[in-house]
Amino acid sequence: MLSQYLPALIFLGVASGLAAVLLLLGTGLGRWLARAPDDAEKRSSYECGFEAFEETRMKFDVRYYLVAILFIVFDLEIAFLFPWAVALDSIGGFGLISMGIFLGILVVGFIYEWKKGALEWD
């Protein structure tokens, strides 16, 4: 029974050993061979060239989330329509009904976005 798992265990051991060696060499050897000294300016937070002057935990407008939902609706639609169109001959009526239900759900999501005003850019 152990002989069946032996190749997987060898692979896991080699991968873990290689990861450990690369992590140790990457952190220790990289700092030792670095040309520039480590200073506080390099480790400071950088955002658009200046220090943050507002609280970072501010609330976002709900329109950002609505745009994300809108993207998902259209992205999923396109991602599933191409393979469906290619395989339409082989899947028959069941595939047509399934895609109709799927597109109906997406239309409900689109109507929700429209009613919430995600398509209006004020």
Image (tube, helix red, strand yellow):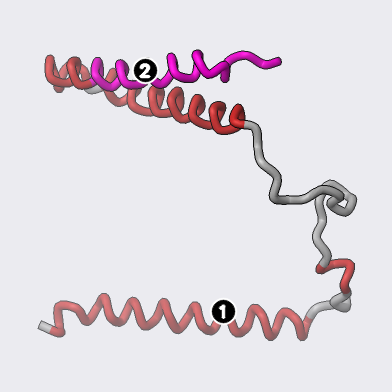
State the quadrant of the C terminus: top right
Q: Main secondary structure of the magenta part?
A: helix
Q: Amino acid at mark 2?
A: Val
Residue 75, position in %: x, y? Answer: 45, 27
Say if 48 sits above or below 13 in the image. above
Q: Residue at x 30, y 26 (%)?
A: 83
The residue nearer to you, when weighing 59 against 16, is: 59
Quadrant in the picture for the N terminus: bottom left
What is the x, y in percent for residue 113? 49, 19
Name the foreground residue: 12 vs 67. 67
Q: Which residue is mark 2?
A: 108
Q: Residue drawn 67% across and 16% down?
A: 121
Amino acid at circle 1: Leu
Q: Secondary structure at mark 1?
A: helix
Image coordinates for residue 86, horizontal then vertical, percent: 27, 21
Which residue is most to the left? 1
Q: Residues within 10 Å of mark 2 (few under 14, many from 20)?
A: few
Q: Residue at x 70, y 45 (%)?
A: 58
Q: Quadrant of residue 39?
A: bottom right
Which residue is identified by label 1? 22
Magenta includes 121?
yes
- Please provide the residue range marked out in magenta: 99-122
Task: Name the foreground residue: 97 vs 1.
Answer: 97
